[in-house]
Structures are given as C-alpha cells and as structure tokens.
Amino acid sequence: MPDRRTLLKSLPAIDRLLEHPQLKDSGEAIPYILLREAAQLTVASLRRQLLDTSAPLPDLTLDSVAVETIQCARRLASPSLCKVINVTGTLLHTNLGRAPLCASALNAIDQIARGYSNLEYDLARGERGKRFSHVEQLLCRLTGGEAATVVNNNAGAVLLCLAALAGGRSALVSRGEMIEIGGSFRIPEVMAAGNVRLVEVGTTNKTHLRDYLDHFDDQTALVLKVHTSNYRVVGFTESVGAAQLAELAHQHGIPVLEDLGSGLLIDLTPYGLPREPTVRESLASGVDVVTFSGDKLLGGPQAGLIVGQREIVDIIRKHPMARALRIDKLTLAALEATLSHYLDPNQALREIPTLTMLTVPAEQLQQRCELLLPRLKEACGDAASFAIVASSATVGGGALPLTELPGSAIAVAPRLLSTNRLCQNLRNCSPPVIGRVQDDRLLIDPRTLPPEDEQPLIGAVSHSLQGDRP
Ligand SMILES: *Cc1c(COP(=O)(O)O)cnc(C)c1O
C-alpha cells in the first residue's frame, strides 16, 4: 500500500504536464492560458484527493492526468451563456431568458449587428435622429398612444417615469399595489431610488376613490397604478379602476402612470386566457402614461416600453436617466420586428413563439406526446418507464399567476438512478435540458419544446438515464 504523502511527490510538475502531447498538440484551439489553468486545477484536485484518506487513490500516470487536464480545459473554454432546452412548461421563465424571439426579430438583429445602421440618423434630413423613432409610430398605432419611447427594461421604465414626473415630490399608490417583482424591484424602493416620496393610500385589500382624494396635496405630482401582475388579492377586496382614478386625478391636475407589467397588445380571452387589460384599454380609460415589458407576454426582447400623452412622454425622454437606461440597437431591431407582427393579430399569434406556445390547443400537445413517447422508449430501453400525463403549464415571468394552461407531458421514472440525479445529468448535457419534477418523476412538457429540439432532447434523456454520467 503506497503512502499517500509519498505519492504527492509523483504528481507531475505543471510545466511537464503542459509538454504532454495530449496538451501540446491537442489539435483544439484552447488558449494556452486556459490549458495552464486547467493543469493547475487538475493537479490541485489530485493533491486534495491524495490528502483525503477517505477518497480512493487517483490514477497518477502522466497520460491520465493529461486526459483529465484536457477535459478540464474544454470546460473552461466552453461559453458560459449557452442555449438550454426548456421542458418545464413555463413559457416566460425569467431564469431561462423569458421570451424566445420570432424569426423576423432574429433576422433584424443579424442585419443590424453586422454593420452600420441609421440608429440615430435621420435619413430624410441627413442629420442626427432619435433612436426611439424606429418604434414610436408602431407603438402609437398599436396602442392609440400619442407618443412613445423605449428603455432597457420595464423596471427601468418605471424608475425613469417616477423620477421624471415626480422626482422631489410625492406620488400616491394603493397599499394593495405595493408589489415586489423579484430581485430588488419593490415599489417603495423604486420610489426612493427615483427620489419620490411614497404616499400609501387605502389598505391591503381595499382601496376606495376617497382614499386617493384624502391624500392629494400641493406635493402630489403623480398617481401610480401598478398592475398586480404576479399575485392576486382575492375575497373581500376593492380597488379603483383606471378610468375613475384618471378622472379624479385629472380634476386635480395630476397625471396617472400605470405600470402594466406584462402589457398585452391583443386580447387573449378568445384562447381561454383570463382578461388582462391591454395597453390600448389602459390609455383609453384616461391613464396618461403606461409602462410595460418587451419580453413578457409581448414575446419580444428585454425592453421597457413607455406610451402615452405627448407632453408627458417628452418630459420622460428629456430626463438624464433616459440616457443611462437607453435601449441598444440589437434590442431595438428585434423589438421593431416583433411589434410589426402585431399590426395583424393573426400574424402575431402565428409568428411570435410566446403567443404560439400560449395558445396551442391541448389536443395538439397530447398528439406531440404520443409521437414523442415511442421515440423516447426506443432510445432509452429499460432505463426508465414513460407515461403520458396531464400537465398544467404556467406562464411565468410574473404574468397571469393563477393561470394554468392545460396540456400533456411525458413523465419519466428512471430505474437506474434517482430522479434528482437524472435532472442533474440532464443539466450537464450539451445543450443542457431543464425539466420539472412532480411526484418524483421528471415531466417533459412539449409546450415549450421547439420541434427541432426533440432529437437532442431524446439523446440527452437516453444518455442521462444510464446512471454513471459525470
Ligand atoms: C415584470 C414587471 C416589472 C419589471 O419588468 P422587467 O421587464 O422585468 O424589468 C415591473 N412591474 C410589473 C408590474 C411587472 O410585472
């Protein structure tokens, strides 16, 4: 039995390891700096293994250490941000990048990214132009607004509007709308960051018109209405509708800002989805300016859209924070392409993946499961049992929180390893696969699975079921 401490002396020196043909002429374009780091990491890990008396003795031959080093170097060289296959059934998974883009948005990004563009150049006049001009008319057509601008995301849009319209003064918000969106986006904190004094009105479950009325004073600059997009207050509740609130605020010469969160441009009730106010409805009810996200139900890139009255949008655009939150050209290209589809709602439903996945009929999902099932069984043999089960998908991204989208999924019960281990193996695949666990089975929900990812998914599942994958 060799002494572990003596074996430490046989660990290869880094320079000698780097001279090994596996590393020197690997034929792979791995930068030297990563090979060196990989060699150091590998030797350090072997040293730890030698010193840990409970660990098995590692193979210390130069060849085997070189192989481990090259594997480590490959991991270091592979991109950190990568495509994943989402079979969780959650359409707008914030952790998985929210909305996939439509084909024309991808084309637009490709065109604009490759070269120069008229981003801030007015071609008719041959002089400096405005970047938001590329989507302003489109947004106005789609919402009935007079003017529009766009920023980096909706959190930024809300912050900017608050700072521009009520900075140094106060804004009224119902206690029933004091939301947290996630991360550190909480209405009271965003108000503070915008230097706006928050005046809470009403109670958690009930806010009446007179609650707002009681709080107007000479410091009041704004009424903020927030769509409670990620939760619902149910039971003994009351809130003031946008129209009533706008009428009251306007009598006092105060504008109303509504943060719609997801912001729908078309009504989705014909597809069995709950009623949500569209941006057009909010503006038509008298709200002066509306903010919403580009990458929630709209199905576009991450962006914060601001639409409303011309004078108000002008004030917002001129605030210094507007420059700090400005949208980049690739996002703008994708946004214009996505919004264009909405000029014909049927085209939007057909072309925008988020809307397609949201409205796909349950029978179609059942059919897809029926076609996937035999292919999975054939690829995986006895390594698991498979069954088609009812599955309810969710929208995610803080939109339509109570909505369950009925559909079907394939439940996978592994035989050779635990479900957790299966999920871990799937996350290690290339591309990684992210599923959902229910009743100790892995659910594969086809709603969020593009057809071209079916084959890689089947490969990943069959590979991951074998048990001893790192
Ligand atoms: C999601 C959401 C936000 C934040 O939007 P992002 O686009 O994620 O920045 C703000 N307000 C409401 C009501 C939301 O639902």
Image (cartoon, rainbow, N blue to C red):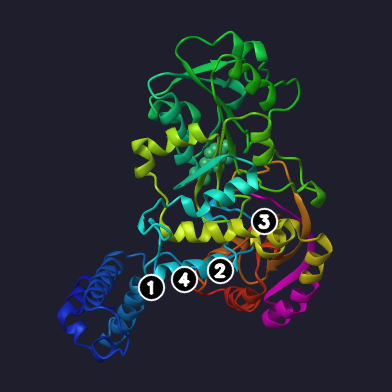
Instruction: Say if mark 2 contacts mark 3, CB within 8 Å.
Output: no
x and y percentages locating residue 425 in the rendered image? 54, 69
Chain-order first, disc 4 or disc 3: 4
* Residue indicated by mark 1: 78
Disc 4 residue type?
A: Asp
Which mark's residue is nearer the viewer, 4 or 1? 4
Chain-order first, disc 2 or disc 1: 1
Q: Residue at x 43, y 33 (%)?
A: 315
Q: Secondary structure at mark 2?
A: helix
Cα distance in 3D space between marks 4 and 3: 23 Å
Q: Residues within 10 Å of mark 4 (few under 14, many from 20)?
A: some
* Residue indicated by mark 3: 343
- The magenta stretch spans which residues? 370-396
* Residue indicated by mark 4: 110
Instruction: Say if mark 2 contacts mark 1, CB within 8 Å.
Output: no
Q: Secondary structure at mark 3?
A: loop
Magenta-drawn stretch contains 117: no
* Residue indicated by mark 2: 426
